Amino acid sequence: MLNKANRQTYHKNGIRMLLGLLLLMLTCHCSPHRQVIENPNIDDWDVEQKHYKNLFPPKYHYMEETEYDAIDFRQPHEKGTRSYALLSDPRGDIDRTKGYDPADYTITTNLSLLNVPMHEVQVTWIRHASFLIQMGGKYQILVDPVLEKIDGIVGTFGKYYAIGRLYAETPLTVEDITSPLYSTLTEDKGSLIVLISHDHYDHLNYNTLKKLPEGTRYYVPHGLEKDFPKKYAHVIGMDWYTTNVVDELSITFLPANHRSGRSVTTTNDSLWGGWLLEWRDHRIYFAGDTGYSAVFRDIRSNVGEMDVCLMPITAWFQRHWHYAPEDAIDAAEDLGCRTFIPWGWGTWIMSFEHMLDPPRRLQYAWGHRQRPEMELRIMKMGETYVSE
C-alpha cells in the first residue's frame, strides 16, 4: 500500500502528466507548423518602426501627375460626373463606370482546355489580380484568387458604396477549378498551389480559400504565414529573393514597392511582392501591386529576364504604391519581358480614373513608347493565353 507521502507524490506526478498532455494537445491543435524561408542577406525590416519596408524609394509620389494625366480617354457616351461618398477625387469627380459593360470585356472560359491542358504554359486571367497559371500540364497555380465576396466588414458594408461594389462577376468559379475532372488531374500530377502577393482584401480572400481542397499548398509573404488559420496545413512564408522547388517547378518571391495590412493596427506587419514561376525554359512573372522604382532593375540583375509579365495598371493616384500604365511598361522593360499582360481593371472602382482608362492609357503609351521587343496582350476576363 502507498503511504501518505507516496500518495501525494503519485497525485502530483499524475497532475503534471495530465497538464503536459493537455499542453501538447493544445499546441498540436492550435499551432500548425509554418515553414518560413528567410533571406538573411536582405535588409527589408525597419528596426526603428518595427515593420517591413521597401528596398528602393519610389520614383513618383502620392497624386504626382505627368502629361498622360491631362488626357481624357473616355468616349462621349462615357462622360458624366458623379459625387462619391468614399474615395472622392479632390480634383473633381467623374462617373467612373458610365458606359462600362463588363460583358464586353469578359468571355466564357474554355473549361475543357483548363481541365486537360494541351499547352506547356496556359495563363487564364480570371478578374482583377486573379490568375490561373498552368505549366507543363502538371502544375496548377492560382494567384491572388478572389472569386467570392470580400471578407469581413469590408465585404459586408463595401457593397453599399460605389467603390466597394462588384462590377464584373467571375468567369471562373471555385467549383470550376475543383471540378471532378480537374481534381483528378491534380491528384494524379500534383497538388493545387496558391500564391498570395500581399494581404489586402482584393488579393487575399479567405472566402475563396476555404473552398479549395485540403491539400492545397499556400505560398505567402513572410509574416503572413502566422495569420493563416490552423485549418490551412501547408503554408510557406517566404522572404524576398528566396526560392522553393516543387519537383520541376521553381517558385521565387520577389520584392515590389507597396505595403501590407488588413487593418490600421497591422500596417506592414508582413511583406508584399511578386512571384516568379520557372518550369524548364518558361518564366512567368506576376508583379503584385507595386509602384515604379529601381527594384525592377534589381530583380533583373538577381534573377534574369522574364518571358511573360503579368502587370497591374490601375490606381495611379497612389503612384508610389501603384503603376500608371506607362510605369508598368518601364518596369517591364527593366525586367526584359517578352510578353506583357495587364491586369487590375474592370472589376472594382480602384481609384479616380474611369473603369476603361487603364487599358486605353496603356495602349496609348504603348504606341508612343515603341517596344518592338515586347508583345502586348490585353486579355478579356476568362481568356486564356497559351505558349509552347
Image: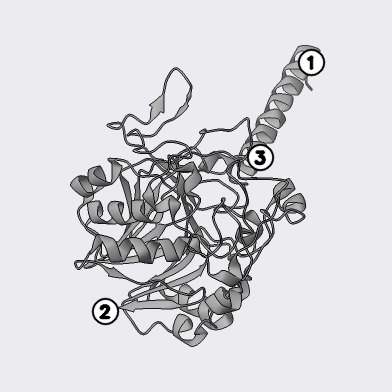
Residue occupying image coordinates x 59% and y 39% = 31
Q: Which mark is residue 3?
A: 1
Q: First in sequence: mark 2 or mark 1?
A: 1
Mark number, residue 25: 3
172 or 65, which is in the foreground?
65
- The reply to whether callout 2 and callout 1 are in contact (CB within 8 Å) is no
Q: Secondary structure at mark 1?
A: loop
Image position of 346 with respect to 220: above or below: below
Q: In whole angstroms, how far apart are the C-alphas of marks 3 and 1?
A: 33 Å
**Mark 1 Cα shell of 10 Å, populated few (<14), some (14-19), many (≥20):** few
Q: Quadrant of the C terminus?
A: bottom left
Three-letter residue code for mark 3: Met
- Residue 163 x %, y %: 66, 53
Give the CA separation, mark 3 to mark 2: 50 Å
Camera sees residue 248: no
Q: Where does the image place residue 332, in percent across and percent down from the top left?
A: 28, 56
Apparent side of residue 45 relative to residue 151 in the rendered image (left or right): left
Please tell me whether mark 2 sits on a helix, a strand or a loop.
Answer: loop
Check contact, mark 3 vs mark 1: CB within 8 A.
no
Q: Amino acid at mark 1?
A: Asn
Under mark 2, the amino acid is Glu
Q: Residue furthest top?
A: 5
Element assignment for label 3: helix
Colour style of the rendered protein structure: one colour
User: In the picture shown, does residue 304 fall above or below 341?
Assistant: above
Nearer to the camera, 274 or 361? 361
Q: Which mark is residue 388?
A: 2
